[in-house]
Amino acid sequence: MQGASGLERAFRKVRLLLEGDERNPGLTRQDLERMVGYPERGQGPLSYTLPPQEGLEGVRAVRFFYYPKDPEVTLIIEVEDQQGRRHLRHLKWNGLAWISPPSGLKSELVPTREVLPEGYTEIGGDYFVGFSSEEAHDLAERIYLGEAGGQKYLLCPQDSTRIFYGPSVAPAGLICPVCGNTSLLFKAIPMEVSRRPQGPQSPGEERLEHKLEILVEQNRELQKQLGDLISLLKRNLG
Ligand SMILES: [Zn+2]
């Protein structure tokens, strides 16, 4: 766990450098260019290794790679942990701040989860947190049998991972144990389709079902926004 917390500290430090706080402004593209020596040292990509400093004690190195000519990825951050594993983050400068590149490359400044975070149990591709091992297995079985209608869970929109949480857990603080995503959707197993007399679905079908759920959710949200927009327009015209 020592290694994991060192990695977390390093990512916190990197985020502080990029985003700044009340005392320090965040790193701009110009700051980055000064750090790597662009354009004097060439057209890139150019690298810069952060000097040892508070917050980076728990990792081997943090390196910034600057891509001046790349329209999508401006900066790749490489955090090398004590075991020599490299954790890459891809960022794009939008003129004001560092944002995720449009290609969906990994950009969140949180440690990559190599091992399951504490408290998570994995059963059949689903994750359970806040349950004893026995409770988790009971629940997994009820879900499998279609007898868990109404059971709440979090869904990761990036990889369709389901995270079931116990009553003692604050779901807002949970992350996807697979990809580290913190923006999870609140879901519940529907009552009406919780019984599946024809047996369990294949993982492919379940994945498709999750994708559909996400689409339905997004559609609902769009319809709501459209409705708001229309009533706003009507009010302005009337
Ligand atoms: Zn995920």
Image (cartoon, rainbow, N blue to C red):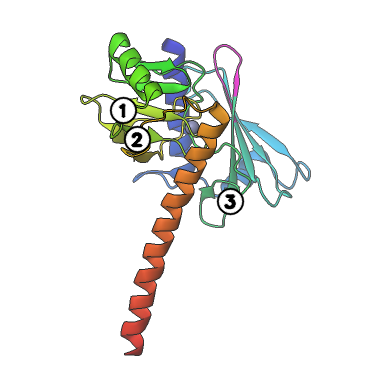
Q: Is residue 2 visible?
A: yes
Side of 86 relative to 108 (left or right): right
Which numbered mark, 3 or 1, is in the foreground of this view? 1
Q: Name the mark on residue 93.
A: 3
Residue at image x 43%, y 16%? 123
Q: Is residue 105 left or right of residue 18?
A: right
Q: Please provide the residue range marked out in magenta.
A: 78-86
Q: Secondary structure at mark 1?
A: loop
With 123 as the anchor, is 82 left or right in this view?
right
Q: Position of residue 56 (x, y in %)?
A: 48, 23
Decide whether residue 79 is among the magenta residues.
Answer: yes
- Residue contact at pointers 1 and 2, CB within 8 angstroms: yes
Q: CB of mark 3 within 8 Å of CB of mark 2?
A: no
How packed mark 3 is, by other alpha carbons closer than 10 Å (few <14, some 14-19, many 20 or more), is some
Pointer 2 residue: 189
Q: Amino acid at mark 3?
A: Trp
Amino acid type for the residue under numbered disc 1: Ala
Residue 203 falls in which quadrant of the image? Answer: top right
* Mark 3 vs 2, N-terminal side: 3
What numbered label is drawn on residue 148? Answer: 1
Label 2 near ligand 1 (CB < 8 Å): no
User: Where is residue 214 drawn, in percent x and y?
Assistant: 46, 46
Residue in front for this viewpoint, 97 or 198: 198
